[in-house]
Image (cartoon, grey):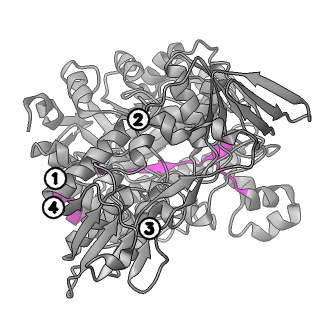
Amino acid sequence: MEDKYQTLFTPWKIGNVEIKNRIVMCSMGGTSIFGWMEPNHFDKEAANFLLERAKNNVGLILPGIAPIRDTMGGKWLYQNKGKFKQLESFMTEFHKTGAKMFIQLTAGMGRAMAVNDLMVKMIKNKALGFLGKPIFDMDYITASASATENRWADGIYSRPLTKKEIQDIIDGFAKTAKLCKDAGVDGIEVHAVHEGYLLDQFTLPYTNQREDEYGGSFENRYRFPVEIVKAIKKECGKEFPVSLRYSVISKTKGFRQGALPDEEYHEVGRDMQESERAAKYLQEAGYDMLNCDNGTYDAWYWAHPPGYMPDNCNLDDVSHIKQYVDIPVVCAGKMDPDTAAKAIAEGKIDAMGVARQFLTDPGWVTKLINNQLDEIKPCINCHNACFTMAKWNGSANEQDLADAIHMARCALNPMTMQTKKYKVVKTSKPKRVAIVGGGIGGMEAALLLKKRGHMPEIYEKSEKLGGVFIAASQSSFKDKDRALIQWYVRQIAENNIVVHYNTEVKDVQSLDADEVIVATGSTAKKLPITGFENGIEAVDYLLGHNVGEKVVIIGGGLTGCEIAYDLILKGKKPVIVEMKNDLIAAKGVCLANSSFLREMLAYKKTEIYLNAATQKIENNKVTIKDKDGNIVEIDCDDVIVSVGYNPKPIAQESKNVHLVGDCYKVGNLRTVIWRVWDICMHI
């Protein structure tokens, strides 16, 4: 281990519980030991997930949030006590690793509940809601401090929780915490005065308009989380540690309006002045640790930072709040080990919180210890599998049901939380496998086949590996994407996989192989627009095509908006023309990612035409028909076209020929890598 990381591996205490190092695996929805979006039970998949990370030298493990009352079915977590017996056996095995575990319990989501179209219908239609109530009691699930609008669906309002319901939740925390303690769990984390979840909705002025003892004054707004920790301590004893998931600053301008880094704004949630007081107040109530970041669901990119957000984006605020408490403070939010180790050594924080890197590479801490940093597969903050809740103008949560009930999976690592479906099994019949195309799909196929005992060879028509992802990773905010390419290139070399560079394959039958995998990617769409050929393809721009000051981008999807942001960072003036009613109106793109881009483009006063059709592209002018049917001419220096791609296979699928990646179906890294596994596990 490098000397600069030594501080990360010093012990510290939460109350009387000693943690062996300063690395905390933060909670992620989907990794709950009691299951996720289903009746509570002891979840073996999550248990295996947590145990593997514990075996890989994590100090403190926080499983995914466990609702005090089931989202599906409405059963209280303290009921069905048999699962706590299973938990007790698990904790005996878990503690052999030297790690500690705090179970994170949540009061619920309230207005942050990511309702989909079916849930919206259940809320609006009383008859349908009544029929569905035994499964999803939407009236209760979305209940909040006050009658506030849901984050995800227009016209859907939460009802205020009754005082009896509040007391039932407090009682549920105490009873469940005691059962966890008796099972050998090391502590509880209360979720959360954080991210605009239910408890946070009580503490924040813009979501709490109550006039009883749970609203109004500072003390009233924080009464709910205070009563929870006091109830847990009464039931479990003062020495039993209780952590609090805590957002230092809400970073929120209003409903569905976040505040961007360095933006001047009026805070409607918790500002730093109140946070200084709140942190001290919550410590005095009995909390033994603050597990911190920033944000709310209205400013979601702070709590779930996409690649566009700065590294260590919450550190300054978290280190500030540490000055006001005597209990340990953890900081999460794109934390890197170098910065974290330095901050801990300087007394600014007590530990670093990391979440999604553990989805991509369960052994990254061990690799850090063993000075194998190049072996760590980097998380790229894409949220393509772990958090796919998408929203655009007029939609609710556009998330596939399979994603909703199976969160915390990973685009880059299919085995994460899917070990029954995806696994590496050695072959008994090694085969020669030719892989046509050295992009991410081709390299992933080669590595998996090699692990299984096959003999893969890559045929790449260019002089380097990476494919279209080379272009996709060029923007300044894509450093993790560039690191991913380099990781793959190193892995290909270390595994002695043969690569034929500058070799274009036109006929797969000419290859000396038992099986062929075609990973030849896609080609840019050509639209029947006059002068379309005058536009610069998105890939060409990303690979370095120079453009002038004012640039029109045809297409406001994810790539088009990322290009616009890239142009802004270069001091240029993008204009976006999009045929849909919103930017990035596509399933699978997490709202944390899309809302950052939409709000950043608005903040930078980017000229945007929605519901607009491009009529003609000329060298220095684009003609469009706007949403009102008016013909508008936009003068510009250059035009970039980003209107999507079509698959480009060089062969058809057959018994021994398999298509993967964009040449099979245009998608993202998740669709590319997961299909590679679907194919290569069965060769």
Tell me residue 131's x, y (percent).
80, 71
Asked if one can make out residue 371 in the rendered structure from this viewpoint, the answer is: yes
Q: Which mark is residue 98?
A: 1
Residue displayed at 34% across by 15% down: 323
Q: Secondary structure at mark 3?
A: loop
Residue receiving disc 3: 660
Give the mark nearer the N terminus: 3 vs 2: 2
Quadrant in which residue 669 is drawn? bottom left
Residue drawn at 27 percent across, 79 percent down: 513
- On the image, which quarter does residue 682 sit in? bottom left
- Between 649 and 223, the one nearer to me in the picture: 649
Are the two marked residues, 1 and 4, in contact with CB atoms closer than 8 angstroms?
Answer: no
**Marked residue nearer the N-terminal end (1 or 4):** 1
Q: Which residue is mark 2?
A: 474
Disc number lying in front (2 or 1):
2
Residue 424 is situated, as x and y percent measured from the top left of the image, at 27, 73
Check the image and report above or below for 27 versus 572. below
Tell me how far mark 1 sits from mark 4, CA to CA.
Answer: 33 Å
